[in-house]
Amino acid sequence: MTNIVVLIKQVPDTWSERKLTDGDYTLDREAADAVLDEINERAVEEALLIKERDGGEVTVLTAGPDRATDAIRKALSMGADKAIHLNDPALHGSDSIQTAYALAAALGQIEGVELVIAGNEATDGRVGAVPAIIAEYLGLPHLTHLRKLTLADGKATGERETDEGVFGLEAPLPAIVSVTEKINEPRFPSFKGIMAAKKKEVQTLTLADIGLDPEIFGVANAASTVTGVTPKPARTAGERVTDEGDGGDKVAQYLVSHKII
Ligand SMILES: Cc1cc2nc3c(=O)[nH]c(=O)nc-3n(C[C@H](O)[C@H](O)[C@H](O)COP(=O)(O)OP(=O)(O)OC[C@H]3O[C@@H](n4cnc5c(N)ncnc54)[C@H](O)[C@@H]3O)c2cc1C
């Protein structure tokens, strides 16, 4: 029996245009369709696989605005048992430290958590630090960038793949793990799952409900600030070199003219 919490985040759909709000460069959430981050679908899938094997309960936890309920429903329709939605306007524009602080406090309210599963990096902020900061706040071990996860004998065992090779990792439970897109293929919610999700428990909490002062959150109190954003120029068609026996020379000339060689 494993009591698992999955950290899920709603993000702008990668297929719709993402915009940052003028002035404070926070994400303009209304400007894009919002979805459950795909890496978090995989995190939920991993929790469900563990539950199907060993029993237990899967809770999803998110910090986000009202419409993050859609992401919660998706996770519940995949098969998660219940959800906690930390929803407080004071969180808007919080940086990764503030977000992690709030999530750590919310996790502290859930009894008997043995494993926390997160994505390695959210597709909007791309900070890639929230799970590690939570681990620090809660004093828990953190296994990062896992492509494989096994639980046995009170331990989490995992594999991390890098360009150099594959690392074997281990930590005693309770622990936090963050997973990569190689961990699994997430299931699609079934019709039965979608119907069942409507009846599952979603607990909504404010910062005050978990004993936190809203005054220390938000863009005005963040330790880090986004100071500018420059979109990448659109890709051009490029330059085609036709080889008429002098292709090598032409390529070399092109590279010299662009100071590449
Ligand atoms: C353009 C831009 C740049 C930014 N740059 C910075 C920066 O340099 N430094 C900084 O501190 N903040 C930055 N922020 C703010 C940052 O996006 C937020 O603090 C965000 O809440 C955490 O960062 P992340 O989503 O990138 O987290 P990551 O650490 O990339 O997320 C990893 C995993 O943590 C979990 N997780 C993350 N957020 C939540 C959540 N709200 N609820 C539940 N689980 C969650 C998920 O499992 C996720 O897969 C930036 C925001 C924007 C829009």
Image (cartoon, rainbow, N blue to C red):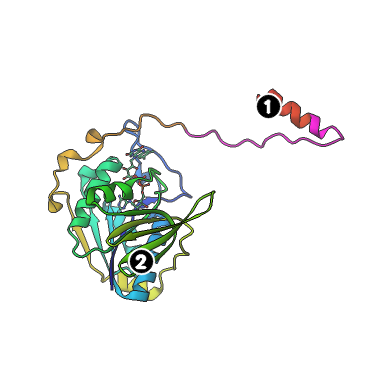
Residue 92 visible in the snapshot = no
Question: In which quadrant of the rendered image does the N terminus lie?
Answer: bottom left
Which element is circle 2 on?
A: helix
Question: In which quadrant of the rendered image does the C terminus lie?
Answer: top right
Residue 133 visible in the snapshot = yes
Query: Circle 1: is it few (<14), some (14-19), or many (20+) Cα within 10 Å?
Result: few
Q: The magenta stretch spans which residues? A: 231-249
Q: Nearer the viewer, residue 90 or 149?
A: 149
Q: How many marks?
A: 2
**Circle 1: residue type:** Ile
Looking at the rendered structure, which numbered label has been put on residue 130? Answer: none
Determine the CA span between mark 2 and mark 1. 50 Å
Ligand 1 within 8 Å of disc 2? The answer is no
Residue beneath the point at 75% across and 32% down: 251
Q: Is residue 244 magenta?
A: yes
Pointer 2: what residue?
A: 47
Looking at the rendered structure, which numbered label has been put on residue 261? Answer: 1
Question: Quadrant of residue 43 in the image?
Answer: bottom left
Residue beneath the point at 42% across and 32% down: 229
Query: Circle 2: is it few (<14), some (14-19), or many (20+) Cα within 10 Å?
Result: many
Residue beneath the point at 70% across and 28% down: 255
**Of helix, strand and loop, which mostly describes the magenta segment?**
loop
In the rendered structure, the answer to whether residue 109 lies left or right of residue 178 reads left
Question: Quadrant of residue 6 in the image?
Answer: bottom left
Instruction: Please determine whether, in this image, residue 50 is positioned above or below residue 119.
Output: below
